[in-house]
Amino acid sequence: MATATHLLTPEEAGAHPAPEAVVVRFAGDSGDGMQLTGGQFTLSTALAGNDLATFPDFPAEIRAPQGTTFGVSAFQINFGSTAIETAGDAPDVLVAMNPAALKVNAQDLKPGGLIIADEGEFGARNLAKAGYEANPLQDGSLAKWQVIAFNISQLTLDAVKPFGLGNKEALRCKNMWTLGLALWMFDRDRAPLIEWLRTKFAKAPELAEANIAALNAGHAYGETAEIGGQFHQHHIEPAPAAPGLYRTVTGAESISLGLVAGAQLAGLKMFFGGYPITPASAILHHLSRLKEYGVTTFQAEDEIAAIGSAIGASYAGSLGVTSSSGPGIALKAEAMGLAIMTELPLVIVNSQRGGPSTGLPTKTEQSDLYQAVYGRNGDAPMPVIAARSPADAFDCAIEACRIAVQYMTPVMLLTDGYIANAAEPWRVPDMSQYQPFPVEFYDDQPSEDAPFSPYARDGKLARVWVKPGTPGLTHRIGGIEKNFGTGHIDYAPDNHQKMTDTRAAKVLGVADSIPGQDVCLGEPGGRLAVVGWGSTFGPIHQAVRRARGRGLDASHIHLRHIWPMPKNFGDLLRSYDRIIVPEMNTGQLKTLLRDQFLVDARPLTKTSGQPFKIAEIEAAIEEALA
């Protein structure tokens, strides 16, 4: 049942017991509480000391018709006693709460893997909704897997009967029954979950006790059932970890904390203007709970109002932040140009999802890279950085804040649906190790010899930042071209040329303050570089590690600063014979690399709404080196 998800190091190979990892997927109807089940199993896994990565996968419909395949919600977790960097290619265990969940997910399961099914839901009506002509639990079609089916629905009803709940309410507890069984299977402590249930249902103690009873019943079933095969208790040792305080963190939580930390390091209050959109809404939710750190949140009536309010906050002397996903970023484009023209600091978070237009609201993609780098009218450059994982998003948010205030420019931070919703352990950093970048507002009084120039610049070409109301420093600001010296409106051709060139040079100058590009795994030069950005980090890293373990000359390079790129990046790329670029779009970074460095970068693309599998990239490496 347990398989390693990465190449073992010599130290790991000599360990006793050997490191291992398991991939479990919970799947059911969107009303079955699979995301809640997965989230709480993740909590218990983190408390057990395992490394982990998760992948929540749910439908876009608020409530799809019950029992249908397009209403299936799933939560996958890869956990183990070794380094985990992806949510896993294929599950070892699939928990299917109904026929539709089995239909959608069974083919992803490893051969010989374990299916746990709620046979109480496999009636004729549900089978028909899922497109089954016969019951797959009985017709032999699941022969290549081990199948254990029992009536979870009835067992749940029996467990919660003493609490007087109606059938509908009682069946809502079956996700807790399933969670209890999973906790037994992997030797997890129930106490933290019981405490969580009592807190969650503090105002309805009868619901808390019913769910606890279901949790305990599922655990007891595992203890007492003599089923055999793969259905047994399995203990996985904790993963090695550096000493420190750890917590699980999603990408949305990590970005929110990073934005707050960035504002604190700049010595500024933060204003967040946002409009709800999947999967970016969680950032607004998290920031709204952090008022004690000088954070003001505003849920605007639309995307344009959201970014407009954030620009206004920056004009007034706060750090303006806004967030959206691809469709909302498109609506914000003109206002981004305004922030570039007025040269005000602004952080724009784009949690990418499948497009175009409304596209795939709950699925992941990396198809907004062109939009981030080029997607504004006129020559309107701005820095773009990309987080590679939920934990990495914290540092990327701080970096976005630093660039925004030091260069007086909007900055776009790219994540995606996978990063935003997925979770991993995060070692809470020592903030004393972070270098502050305090802002100094301009308040020098003008004189006849030295009149005030709102576009006076420092060595980084960043203009001065003046708080409104500062005596003697009244100035014009807006979206019409400014005179290079005075800031007055100026349509002169030479002036527009100079201002356009200056704004571009300022953004390109950001490269002076970012580190040179490193090689994540492998050598600086060789036969093949696998170049990635964003959430493709995990599968690329594991694929390259496996390839190198078989003696293949492959290296992994992962780009954080999308624009401008690190100064050494071109020379580094040219030191390889071949370059492949895996990305969840039709080849956008590949095109950018060809344009900037004239290298023969080859694409490996995927636009299914699902993350790359390690095996897909591994096969591309083998083909490139064949």
Image (cartoon, grey):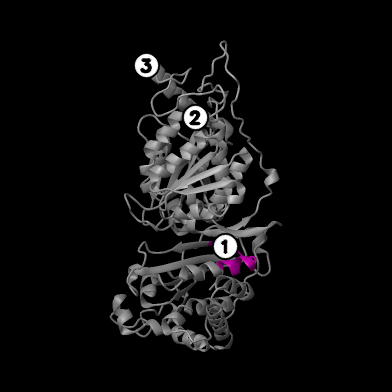
Q: Quadrant of residue 523?
A: top right
On residue 508, the disc is 2
The residue mark sitting in front, 2 or 3, is 3
State the image coordinates of residue 435 (x, y, percent, origin top left).
66, 39
Return the residue at label 1. 52
State the image coordinates of residue 286 (x, y, percent, origin top left).
53, 55
On residue 426, the disc is none
Q: Which residues are magenta?
A: 42-53
Residue 396 is at least partly visible in this image: no
Comes first in the chain, label 2 or label 1:
1
Residue 69 is at least partly visible in this image: yes
Q: Nearer the viewer, residue 90 or 54?
A: 54
Residue found at x 45% / y 58%: 613
On residue 492, the disc is 3
Residue found at x 38% / y 39%: 333
Report, in whole angstroms, how far the alpha carbon at label 2 lies from the one at label 3: 24 Å
The amino acid marked with disc number 2 is Leu
Query: Hey, which residue is sitting farthest top in the picture?
Result: 449
Report, in whole angstroms, how far the alpha carbon at label 2 lies from the one at label 1: 38 Å
Residue found at x 30% / y 82%: 125
The amino acid marked with disc number 3 is Ala
Q: Secondary structure at mark 3?
A: loop
The residue mark sitting in front, 1 or 3, is 3
